[in-house]
Image (cartoon, rainbow, N blue to C red):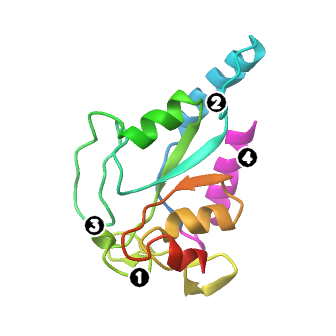
Amino acid sequence: MLVAEALGKIDATQGTLNAFRVVRHAAAMAEARDADRRLASGERLPLLGVPIAIKDDVDMAGEPTAFGCAGEFPPADADCEAVRRLRAAGAVIVGKTNSSELGQWPFTEGPAFGATRNPWHLDHSAGGSSGGSAAAVAAGLVPAAVGSDGAGSVRIPAA
């Protein structure tokens, strides 16, 4: 099962790579089992059962949106449009990735979660506020992740 493999990779690298702020172990596995049942019954969707990560600057129902900041945040009431569309396509959201505070820094590091490392050079930042998403994909933890870009948040890690 792809989701179980992704969760295992996330757990194995969280201590060094630190790409994720929230990992949805139980919820993602339940969604993956549902996806497997749907696939077995013949249902086909573009992303059915595919593990995807989202940046911690977008709302996902039931999870806080801290946007890289320290503190307590209430769970979001609803999915943002990007998450809604990913779910409609069958994706399983495995977690929310680290982001610099308020997306304002060109590195993915902060007092709320520590540093997200570049998977190719662990002594370097993943870069950009979408560094958690970029590191998760570059390290092969998930096949795709949502990032955002206003001033290099995706372009810096991509470089």
Name the N-terminal-most of marks 2 and 3: 2
Q: Residues within 10 Å of mark 3 (few under 14, many from 20)?
A: some
For discs 1 and 2, the disc positioned in front in the rendered view: 1
Marks 1, 4: nearer the viewer:
1
State how far apart marks 1 and 4 are (Cα).
Answer: 30 Å
Task: Indicate whether 131 appears above or below 122.
Answer: above
Q: Secondary structure at mark 4?
A: helix
> Alpha carbon of mark 2 to alpha carbon of mark 3: how far?
30 Å
Q: Residue at x 71, y 21 (%)?
A: 44
Cβ atoms under marks 3 and 1 closer than 8 Å: no
User: Chief secondary structure of the magenta span?
Assistant: helix
Q: In which quadrant will I find the C terminus?
A: bottom right
Q: Are marks 2 and 3 in contact (CB under 8 Å)?
A: no
Q: Which residue is mark 1?
A: 106
In the displayed structure image, the side of residue 48 where residue 146 appears, left or right: left
Residue drawn 54% across the image and 51% down it: 53
Q: Which residue is mark 3?
A: 69
Where does the magenta region start and end? Answer: 1-18
Which residue is under mark 2? 32
Q: Secondary structure at mark 2?
A: helix
Which amino acid, by three-letter code, is at mark 1? Pro
- Is 101 in the magenta? no
Is 46 above or below relative to 119?
above
> Dot 4, crowdedness within 10 Å: few (<14), some or many (≥20)?
few
**Image mark for residue 5:** 4
Label 4 vs 3, first from the N-terminus: 4
Helix, strand or loop under label 1: loop
The CA span between labels 4 and 3 is 29 Å
Q: Nearer the viewer, mark 3 or mark 1?
A: 1
